[in-house]
Amino acid sequence: MSFPEFVSDLAIPPQEYHRQLREWSGWMRKHQPVVYNEATAEWVVFRYADVVRVTSDYAVFSSEGTVIKDASDQKQGTSIIEMDPPQHQRMRSLVTQAFSARTISALAPQIKQITNDLIDRTISKGKMDWMVDFAHPLPVIVIAEMLGLPRDQWPHFKAWTDSIINRSPDSEQAAQSLMGFFIQAVETRRQHPGQKDILSLLIESEVDGQHLSQEDLLSFCSTLLIAGNITTTTMLGNAIMCLDEHPEAIDRLRQHPEAIPTAVEEILRYMPPFRAGPNDLLRGRLVKTDVQLGDQWIRKGEKVQVNRIAANFDERQFPDPNSFDVERTPNRHQSFGHGVHFCLGAPLARLEVAIALETMLERFQSIQLLHDKPLEQMPSLLIFCAKELPMTFQAA
Ligand code: HEM
């Protein structure tokens, strides 16, 4: 089959798009849970159990070749996203500690400070664009500081990584600029070693007694910078869209701020940052041996893509999946993936969004998302969020 046109239609306002996607995914889960999409030449699975299986069983569903490279990417090394064990484990273990829940929780005061600084810039105006003024800068500043890159350069990092993800006409140029920047930053650290940032950690790391090759080092850095900002920005925006659709949830969180961590999980479940349709950045898993999924046989060499939003609304896993419940527990959504590739940055993303929500509730008595013009989607086939979220607020 081919997916309906709306799945790749970036002109539909985001909340309406999301509604249509939920409805269609529900139909697919029920009637065609494992389907071959001719447009992408990939199988797609829609049920929770199949999504978990495909992302857990790496011996059958390999991550090899999942990152689609354009001409400018060819010189790059391999990203951990496209590695299988044991190589994957060796690379991931280099940064596990730097991204552990414990290390990340120590960053809370720094993240709170950046959050307050960003809000200070708009507080007297009574209005802001949540994306432009807040959701774009926060995650990119945080990950840049973790990597040891200069904070004031964040607009460049943001522009380059957005261009790469959106496959904009200048994406090759952006990838070259980003690489040029990292080459310079690596060179500076080689001349002045000993700094306590992730870039220095990776330069000094060894795998099987050898330092990382320059290509693998650069690839790791750009994976962290890209993965560490775009998805969290998206989620910060999607949080506002969820709360706009469910204003009773804001009242609930004001009365029970201790529910913010479960609200973060529900936002992730309900409006995950990744789209489910065809895109030109990430392919599905590569099938290593003939395998049966549902009532379909998938042959060695074919690809399987997982539809995480469909899994997140699977009624076999989530009671009353269409209701947005900020106190939902348990909530084992698939938005951070599953298995060995489970999102390395999950503790960081969770902390940033929780601090953003907590600060927003502290500093704004009320917020109103403006709908005088229809909202627009971000021009990306990989991620789902709004391009701009203009809003007014009453400062507390
Ligand atoms: C709400 C925000 C985020 C979401 C929804 C998200 C989602 C995901 C998902 C679904 C995967 C699994 C991909 C797969 O199975 O192929 C993943 C992996 C990854 N994420 Fe995140 N992510 C987020 C934030 C972050 C942040 C802040 C970082 C920080 C660096 C990060 C770094 C990574 C890395 C490095 C991987 C690859 C892990 C591996 O292959 O072992 N992510 N993420």
Image: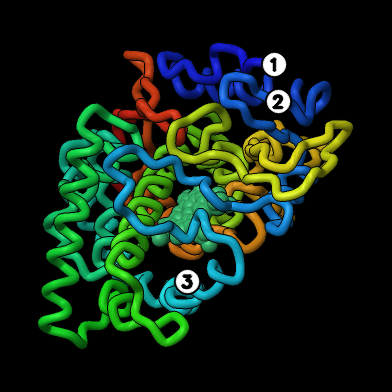
Q: Earlier in the sequence, mark 1 or mark 2?
A: 1
Could you tell me residue 302's position as x and y percent? 67, 37
**Residue type, numbered disc 3:** Met
**Mark 1 closeness class: few <14, some 14–19, many ≥20 residues within 10 Å:** few
Residue tagged 1: 1
Establish if 144 lies above or below 364: below
Is residue 288 at least partly visible in the picture? yes
State if disc 2 and disc 1 touch (CB < 8 Å): yes
Residue found 66% across the figure and 42% down from its top: 325
State if disc 1 and disc 3 touch (CB < 8 Å): no
Q: Nearer the viewer, residue 129 or 315?
A: 315
Residue found 56% across the figure and 52% down from its top: 64
**Residue type, numbered disc 2:** Tyr
Pointer 2 residue Cβ closer than 8 Å to ligand 1: no
**Residue type, numbered disc 1:** Met
Q: Nearer the viewer, residue 290 or 42?
A: 290
Establish if 5 lies above or below 17: above
Residue found 16% across the figure and 42% down from its top: 124
Residue at the limit of the structure toward the right, as seen here: 295
The label shown at residue 36 is 2
- Helix, strand or loop at label 1? It is loop
**Mark 2 closeness class: few <14, some 14–19, many ≥20 residues within 10 Å:** many
Residue tagged 3: 91
Residue found 49% across the figure and 40% down from its top: 282
Q: Hey, which quadrant is residue 76 in on the image?
A: bottom left
**Mark 3 closeness class: few <14, some 14–19, many ≥20 residues within 10 Å:** many
Establish if 113 lies above or below 5: below
